Amino acid sequence: MGFKEDADFARFVSMGAVATDAVRTDLKRYGHEVIELERYAMANKVWQTKVKRLRLPDLVCSRCGLRIESRGKSQLAIVLSHSDAEGRSSDGGGMRDRDLYAFVRLDLAGSSPHTSQPVYFRTSDLRTSENGAKESNRKAISEGSELTLTWMSWVPARSGVFVGLDTEGRLVCHWDDGRSFRYWPWRGWPARYVYLAPGDRIVANETTVAGVVGPPGDFTCPGAWDLRAALSDSDPAERYAATKVAGILKRSDLVDELTHIAGGRDRLATAARGQRQPGAARRQVDQADNRDGYHTGAQRRTTH
C-alpha cells in the first residue's frame, strides 16, 4: 500500500475538515442539526484504528437521519474518487439514494480558511448521470491507486449575473466589467441542468452554473427520525448512526435498546455508543471490541 507524503496528507486532511465544518454550518439554513458520523470528520486528527468493515459518510442529521458526504477542493468541481476495492466506489460508504454529497471550494492560503457556499447533489442523481462523468488516469501507488470521476459542469472564472438562455440554447452571463458572455459547449453534454435562476449572482470560481447532474430538489429537514426503529434496522450504518445520535441526545427512553446493543454482538453500533461514554465505561466498550477483533479507534494521532 502506498502513502501520501506527510505534508500533502496533512493538507488534504485539513481541507476535508474545513469543508465538512462549512457544510455542517450551511445545512442549518435548511433546518438540519448535523453531527459528525465519521469520527474527526471536522478536525485534522486521524484515528489509526477504526470500526472494521464499515465505511461511513462524514455527517448525519440528528433530526431526520440524512447522511452527508463532503468534498473540499481548491477548484470547485463535481469530483469523486473511485476504486474497484470493495466499499471504495465513488458512491459507496453508506450513502443511500436520498443522501447528499456536498462540494466546496477552499482557499487555505490566507490567515483564515475561505470556503464557497456548498453545492449539493443526491447520490441517486450522481449514479444516474455517470455517463456524463470523465474518468482520470489511475493515480500512482503512492496516492492510493484511485481514479477520479469528474462530472461535466461549468464554474465561471468571472463574477457577474446569470441572465438565462438565449434562442440558441447558450448560457448567457453579464460580467461585472460590463461584458456579456455566451457559453455554448454545454450543448454537447449528455444531460443539461441549470442550477441558477435569471438574476442570480455568480461568484468567480465559486458558483456552479450548470452541469450534467440533476439538482437535489428540496432537502429541508423533515425531522421525525424514528431512532427506535433505526436501532434495529438491517443497515449497519443506520444502526451506527442511530446509536451515536441517541447518546448525544441523551435519549433515556432508548436505554433498553442501547443496553441490548452494548451486551450483544452488534459491535458496530457499540462502537458508536462508546464514543459518547467517558472513562471506565468507554474503556469497557473498547476492551470488549478488542476481545472480539473489532477496533473502534482507541488510538489516534494528530496531524499539523
Image (cartoon, rainbow, N blue to C red):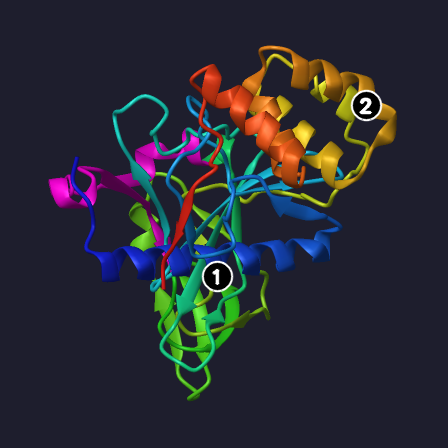
Relative height, residue 150 to residue 180 (above, below): above
Q: Nearer the viewer, mark 1 or mark 2?
A: 2
Q: Which residue in the protein does label 2 denote?
A: 255
Locate residue 80 relative to residue 195 in the image: left or right.
left
Q: Is residue 169 in view from this perspective? A: no
Determine which quarter of the picture holds residue 129.
top left
Relative height, residue 297 to residue 16 (above, below): above
- Mark 1–mark 2 CB contact (< 8 Å): no
Q: Which residue in the protein does label 1 denote?
A: 18
- Across and down, in percent, residue 24 comes to 61, 54
For the point 52% across and 54% down, the residue is 42
Q: Locate the C terminus and report the quarter of the image it occupies.
A: bottom left
Helix, strand, or loop for circle 2? helix
Near-viewer residue (124 or 50): 50
Q: Is residue 266 in view from this perspective? A: yes
Determine which quarter of the picture holds residue 199.
bottom right
Residue type, mark 2 in image: Val
- Across and down, in percent, residue 247 comes to 73, 35
Helix, strand, or loop for circle 1? helix
For the point 39% across and 69% down, the residue is 205
Locate residue 243 relative to residue 39 in the image: left or right.
right
Q: Residues within 10 Å of mark 1 (few under 14, many from 20)?
A: many
What's the magenta region?
126-154
